[in-house]
Image: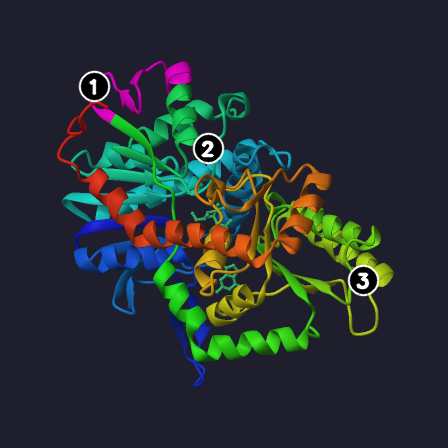
Amino acid sequence: MPADLVIVANRLPVDQVENPDGSTGWRPSPGGLVSAIEPVMRAADGVWIGWPGGVDRDLEPFEADGLHLVPMSMSASEIENFYEGFSNGTLWPLYHDLVAKPEFHRVWWDAYVSVNERFAAKAAEVAAEGATVWVHDYQLQLVPQMLRDLRPDLRIGFYLHIPFPPGELFQQLPWRRQILEGLLGADLVGFQLPGAAGNFVRLVRQRVGHKTHRDRVLLPDGRTVRAEAFPISIDAAGFEELARSEGVVERSKEIREALGNPRKIFLGIDRLDYTKGIYARLRAFAELIEDGELDVEDAVFVQVAVPSREEVEQYRILRDDIDRLVGRVNGDLGRIGRPAISYLHSSYPREEMAALYRTADVMVVTPYRDGMNLVAKEYVACRTEDDGALVLSEFAGAADELRQAWLINPYDINGMKQALLDAWRAPDKELTRRMKAMRRTVQKHDVAAWAESFMTRLNDDGPDSRPES
Ligand code: GDG
């Protein structure tokens, strides 16, 4: 099955489901990446390599919904050392401003190298002569160079979905040079923001000693690697259509009713992750009630926390901390039938997400650091009546585009409280002005435009085809 386009990502874009007759099948996983890449995959009859989840599952390549999928098995020790360890215990906190303390363990690194080797070998096996391979995210940063060593004929792109840290932080990593060299195997390295691309180029110059020119790295063998920003987005039209659908409009009314028809509903939707700033935002909201600025008869905070990485210690601690905070706030400030915070530790279908976005008067997105944050963009896409307020952290990539949000510093609790109040009190006219502008941005720069711009850039005729600017 030699393929002209190969996507390599930690996870396959499908989840296993049990059919009513007891047999198992596959369902496309929710999330923008799949819908972004799907059209590109279909057009090129591409193949997607990734882990299907589960331990030691040796599955044959299969097709789901017309997509060619190549599953990679993962052993219990690889899940522990490569996935939970080096990917989520070392790189994730290191790349997110050290919001948690990264741990550096040599056994984790060894597993990271060997899993990256397996993914690279599989990509080398399935790629046709001269094919394009697009590698995704922090779990697979060594794959580009490993793959180039095996298959110099390929065109290789890499995209990092999370931030790329400044040198001051990155240099803590004992294997910093190997990671930079791994990424340099790509022809094009894509980041969410220009600042991340700049961090990468600077580090390559300082730590690896290669010559650089603006967004290009000039390698001794004459090859050029480009590092550029491609801010990811969402299927804006798809979300908008969903938000307008009868079922979602109806469900939105039901949700408001079930919450006791409060005057304003605040909403947070996040993976339960310490980078997302959930604890501080709930505290800020609770303080506004304590201060008498808000009243539980008028306002409720709905927080959806989607279970995530539950085997990793820091995630368990976070869950306990938030459980305790919500319990205390509701115990102290709630009244019968009127909790201050309606807390849901669960994941929901896309329709329910759209209904929640439609219902919320104030969407609160307060990460300490986030590559982009698609939730903020999804909220905007679902505000078909041009109303609703977005309170957004300056440290989310999305803040670069959604300038009309109430931008906050999530470390500044008083500033956050003020922004919540300002958003709550904003006159309709101001809400409309801000939301209209943000909607235009999200509609124009959707995920299809993102995928296309990356692929076009990757398949440019030559590294120097772009005129000097
Ligand atoms: C990483 C980077 C970057 C969430 N809960 C449910 C659900 N979701 C969907 C949302 C959204 C996605 O998951 C979450 O994306 P985010 O961007 O908010 O955050 P991360 O998961 O941290 O993603 C991030 C992203 O990669 C893409 O490059 O933006 O910065 O950290 O689409 O809607 N979807 C459904 N049910 C849920 O319960 N169906």
Q: Which residue sits at x=15%, y=31%?
A: 462
Q: Mark 3 = which residue? A: 330
Dot 1 alpha-carbon crowd within 10 angstroms: few under 14, some 14 to 19, many 20 or more? few
**Mark 3: secondary structure:** helix
2 or 3: tag closer to the N-terminus: 2
Q: CA distance from mark 3 to mark 1?
A: 63 Å
Q: Mark 2 = which residue? A: 164
Q: Mark 1 = which residue? A: 221
Q: Position of residue 277 (x, y in %)?
A: 64, 45
Can you see residue 113?
yes
Is the distance from the Cβ of mark 3 to the nearest ligand 1 atom less than 8 Å?
A: no
**Mark 2: secondary structure:** loop
Relative horizontal placement of residue 446, taking residue 112 as reference (left or right)? left
Label 1 sits on what residue type?
A: Asp
Q: Are marks 2 and 1 in contact (CB under 8 Å)?
A: no
Q: Are marks 3 and 1 in contact (CB under 8 Å)?
A: no
Label 2 sits on what residue type?
A: Phe
Q: Which residue sits at x=48%, y=42%?
A: 403
Q: Which quadrant of the figure contains the C terminus?
A: top left
Rendered image quadrant of residue 93:
top right
Q: Position of residue 1 (x, y in %)?
A: 17, 57
Q: Which residues are magenta?
A: 204-224
Label 3 sits on what residue type?
A: Asn
**Mark 1: secondary structure:** loop
Most foreground residue, 73 or 123 = 123
